[in-house]
Image (spheres, coloured by chain):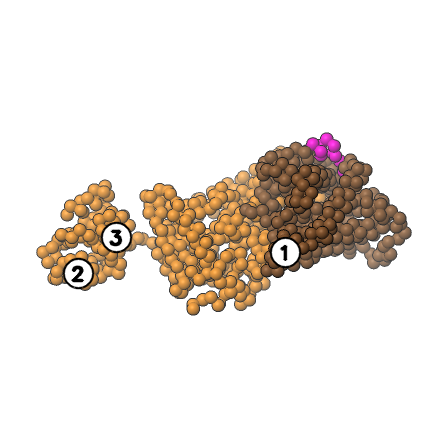
Chain colours: A brown, B orange
Amino acid sequence: MKEQISIRQTACFCAISLLALKLIALPSLLFEKSNSSGLIVAILLFIADFLMLFLYLKIKEKYPDFSLYEIIKKYLGKIIAKIVYILIYLFFVFKLCMLMNEGVLYMQDVVDEDYSLIVFLLTYLPVITALSFNGLKSCARTCEFGFVFIIIGLIICLFLSEISLSFGEIGPLFIKDTKNILSACFDYNFWFSDFLFVTILADKIKIEKNAKRKIFSFVFMVAILLLILYFVYFRLFRVTAFLNKNAIADVTEYNRNIGNSGNIDIISILVYLFVIFLQGSLYMNCLRICYEKIFEYKNSYHSLISANIILILFEYFIFFNIQKITDFVLFYFKYFGALIWIIIPLFYILLIIICKEKKYDKKYKKLYKKI
Amino acid sequence: MEIIDKIKKQLNNNPDILVREIIVSNKKISMIFLKSTIDKMLLVQSIISPLIDYKGEVTLDNLKNEVLKVIEIEKVTKKDFVKNVIRNKVLLFVEGENDALCLDVEYFPTRQPAEPPTSPTIQGPREGFTESVKTTIALIRKQLPTKHLIIKNYFVGELTHTQITMFYLDNLADKKLIKKIEKKIKKINTDAILDSHYIINYLSDRPNSLFEQFGLTEKPDIVTAKILEGRVAIAVDGSPIVITIPFMIMEDLQNSNDYYTNSHYTSFIRFIRALGIIMATVVPGVYLSFRLYHYKVVPLKYILTINATTQNLPFTPFIEMLFILILFQMLYEVSLRLPRYLGLATSIVGALVLGDTGVQAGLISSPGIIVIALSLISMYTIPNQAPQLSILRFIFLMIGGTLGLFGIIGGMVYFINYLNTMNEFDTPNLAPYSPRIKNDLQDALTRQPISKMKTRPKVIKNKDEKRGLGGEK
């Protein structure tokens, strides 16, 4: 199979990326730092993420056959391209580690208190590796297949949680604390910057009509659902929100026994577990592609085995629990975020401004007009 | 005649080879054929009797044009003599001539088209294919009386020379698809083709795949509907099963009954079938994982009920579930293989006696039996996938018992991905859901009324997308 994915599949990837790391620990962290203004922090970071996505898609229109690597190589040289890709490789490794740690936390919290990291790794890594080995196209199709169920499940969870809120509780949302907003945005940038994968996969995304509109409709929908989740979460737990480290589980726990027919939170379990598998496979694909670019040869076995070894080493010996990786990210990794949040967008903006009427551009403008 | 002796020798002088000689107008006419595969009455009435009555000049051309009352006659040369005798034709020789006439009076005992046991219909046509490819051709011809219907024959198998017949509509089917199938059929190099399933392995790019990659049916109405969507159908002599290509897994959720009932009911029942797949595959595994690891997820009342029935069992939940599953699978296999009256008795002994006494003796629990029985029954909501679902049930039971719920979800994601890697004849297996093809959703998990289905499925490449405009021109 040719590794080409459709715009709808890209949109599903974007939407699931937006969900993956924001359902568990992020709301409590946001609340811990900026109290009830956490919602504003989330909105600001969402907006920043959307702007970046817009920029990535604009560059995709300009250079449809180029990924970030080819673009950097063309303008700044091979060595810089490789350095950037090594950093991006690390970024995805950390993201996957965070995803795995959140997964373990979730399993321990909701499903089984004794759930161990080893069992998690033994289950999770083979599956996402197999998905990545089968290729980006089948992975994108799997994501497209699961997306509908994930969204329906999430809507059901949120709806059931909403009805457990009494209307009297819905008051002014943004109460007092607004001073920490910007520093919170800086601290928690790692949990966002979800669309970086678009730059890595840009050359594999098909050119289609209304691409931006399609992608943005998906990500807006998911962002709204997430904001509803955060809203319900803040309203339910108020000042104790920072103690509830597992947002989706704690919110759905409120409707545990509706109609005395059983635990409704099984829906949220299914939604979350599907999300982390799909997101993990996307990150694994990104790691595979980065590896292939860095070492300039294609071998799925080598790239995936090395990614697995690195992940196991990081996860088992360095970030063995959620607190460890959260601390690491909050102390060190937020500076690394500058690469994703400032340098790459700046480079892209410069490309858009400077290379306005290149021959290359004209050729693809014609192609777009045809579509 | 020397040539007759040679043919007999080449056919090892088998006892069913018969040579009949007649003298007509002072010339010897010899016939050689396999007596077991010809219609004797027809032979007498349309060949022997006219020959005896004939008084004119005896040449092969005269006999062909004026005497013999057979529909299919052809003049054949020496190199085709043996081949035609093997293919159940009568070879007629005239003294002094080198060639022969090949006459078709073939007869095989065949059964009449009847309702296929694998797909009974409540309110639709009850005809089914038989083992004879001639019947298959006739039934499809009856349903598709159009000049666009193309029928191509191939003979495959060094020893069996099995007839494989391909059907398609030349104004709809994709040329590339036809060429690809033809190429694969011509490449088949084997001794024998005894059934449709034999050639599936040769047609598939991934013969080791767990899931079905070809549509299989015994009903002419289904084959016709699929040909009308631009698909290609392949019938094999000796098999009542017709293969349709390309195939998507969604087709197994569909049933011919669906098109003869209300579209709302059809949509509802297809959801039930989809639910059946989940029940058949993952429910035993999920139940086991809940009992072993994730009892927190189960409501308290159910935990108490399950606990009351399982606390004195001698086996671990994993062994217990495995035991029940193997027991039920054995009973299922036995009931399929035994004669009907014995199968019924075995079912009673197995299901009632073993199950009931097993529970009363405290060896197995009733929730375990209920879960496995539910899973087995659900499997038959889509009978075409029953073997695959049985394997998946075992796999998910193992995963549930070892890795728990997380493993089951991982397994589900993996198998969905596996289905997505299947792209036989450039058709995605999980279409129209992944990739999503909006147009094709009109007849997928839900179904629109037939009058509203104005286009053919886009996932199948065909020359004319609109229904109704591309017919007879």
Query: Who's the residue at 20% across and 58% down the image?
Result: B47
Say if A322 sits above or below B44 in the image: above
Residue at x-position 88% and y-position 50%: A178
Closer mark to the observer between disc 1 and disc 2: 1
Q: Residues within 10 Å of mark 2 (few under 14, many from 20)?
A: few
Q: Position of residue A269 (x, y in %)?
A: 70, 46
Q: Callout 3, which amino acid?
A: Lys
Query: In the rendered image, which quarter is residue B302 located in?
Result: top right
Q: Can you name the residue that lies furthest to the right here?
A: A176
Which residue is label 2 attached to? B62
Question: Tag 1's secondary structure?
Answer: helix
The span picked out in magenta is: A313-322
User: Which mark identifies residue B89?
Assistant: 3
State the CA–CA distance, disc 2 to disc 3: 20 Å
Q: Which residue is tagged 1?
A: A362
Residue A312 lies in quadrant: top right
| Secondary structure, magenta segment, majority class | helix
Above-or-below relation of B174 to B157: below
Q: Which residue is more in the foreground, B147 or A73?
A: A73
